[in-house]
Amino acid sequence: MSTSPIISLTGIRKVFTTDEVETHALADIHLEIHKGEYVAISGPSGCGKSTLLSILGLLDAPTSGGYTLNGKEVSNLTLAQRARIRNREIGFIFQSFNLIGDLTVFENVALPLAYRGVPPGERRASALKALEVVGMSHRVNHYPAQLSGGQQQRVAVARAMGGRPSILLADEPTGNLDSSNGETVMGLLKDLHRDGSTICMVTHDQRFTQAADRNIHLFDGRVVAEASLQTA
Ligand code: ADP
Ligand code: MG
């Protein structure tokens, strides 16, 4: 095990340019995330939380600044290089689940493993194991539309963790769930963290930031407060 961070951001800026308007979504972000950490990011709507997660998840590139992921500089990669690293290193959980509607639960979880070249037998075993962890073994042949929102998000968690990524990124994962399903999904993230997963989650729900080791508060694209919540 190494003590160097999994993620290191230095001076990250993101500017969106549309027509004549420049939006400075992120300004000079410095952030390190270590193996096994659970980091919560909060802040008002529009402060840059999703932009930060997109950059961390290699869905988007920063305008400037450095990003080292597992010791490799990844801020200036091509789209194809980013996609390849994302598939191996990143698990993403979105507010709106983002499951593929015409694939079954099992196929949704197995698909990223197929992209990655995992052989069918191993793919099947990993997907079924991940679905067991989230309590969805009884619905492997269902389609997303046949599931409740809470169940869909549990499948999305299984998909995100199925390939054992270096880090799980979750963008308001309970935003579309009622409070009971929200607690179930947060409980799953807490279990994954306890079992060693590294997690970075955006949430504006104060109840859920308490499960994290560290809470980062963003405002206008800057980190304005950082608090260690517990030492675990
Ligand atoms: P949050 O997730 O905290 O609500 P976002 O990261 O989505 O905030 O957005 C931060 C700022 O960047 C907002 O002002 C938003 O309007 C702007 N923004 C986000 N994505 C784009 C985009 N693709 N094009 C232009 N502006 C964007
Ligand atoms: Mg957002």
Image (cartoon, rainbow, N blue to C red):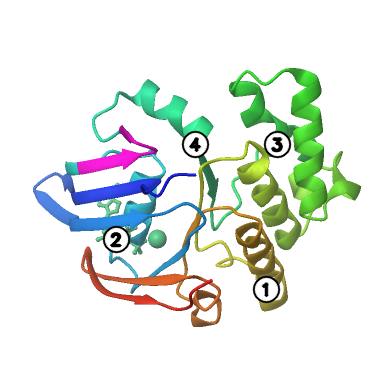
The C terminus - image quarter: bottom right
**Residue beneath label 3, please?**
108
Which comes sooner in the sequence, label 4 or label 2?
Answer: 2
Tell which quarter ligand 2 is in.
bottom left
* Camera sees residue 110: yes
Q: Which residue is depicted at the point 83% across and 49% down?
A: 132
Residue 183: numbered disc: 1
Q: CA distance from mark 3 to mark 4?
A: 18 Å
Q: CA distance from mark 2 to mark 3?
A: 29 Å
Q: Main secondary structure of the magenta part?
A: strand
Q: The residue tagged with tag 3: helix, strand or loop?
A: helix
Residue 174: numbered disc: none
Which comes sooner in the sequence, label 2 or label 3?
Answer: 2
Say which quarter of the image contains residue 228. bottom left
Mark whose residue sits in front, 4 or 2 = 4
Find residue 159 and report its horizontal and vertical position in percent.
66, 42
**Residue beneath label 2, please?**
48
Seen as rendered, the residue at the extreme bottom is: 207
Residue 229 left/right relative to 164: left
Q: Depth check: 16 or 145 in front?
A: 16
Find residue 143 and report its horizontal and vertical position in percent.
79, 42
Label 2 CB-ligand 1 distance < 8 A: yes
Q: The residue tagged with tag 4: helix, strand or loop?
A: helix
Which comes sooner in the sequence, label 3 or label 4?
Answer: 4
Q: Which residue is depicted at the point 21% across and 42% down?
A: 66
Q: Which residue is depicted at the point 47% across and 51% down?
A: 35
Mark whose residue sits in front, 3 or 1 = 1
Residues in magenta?
A: 66-73
| Magenta region includes residue 221 | no
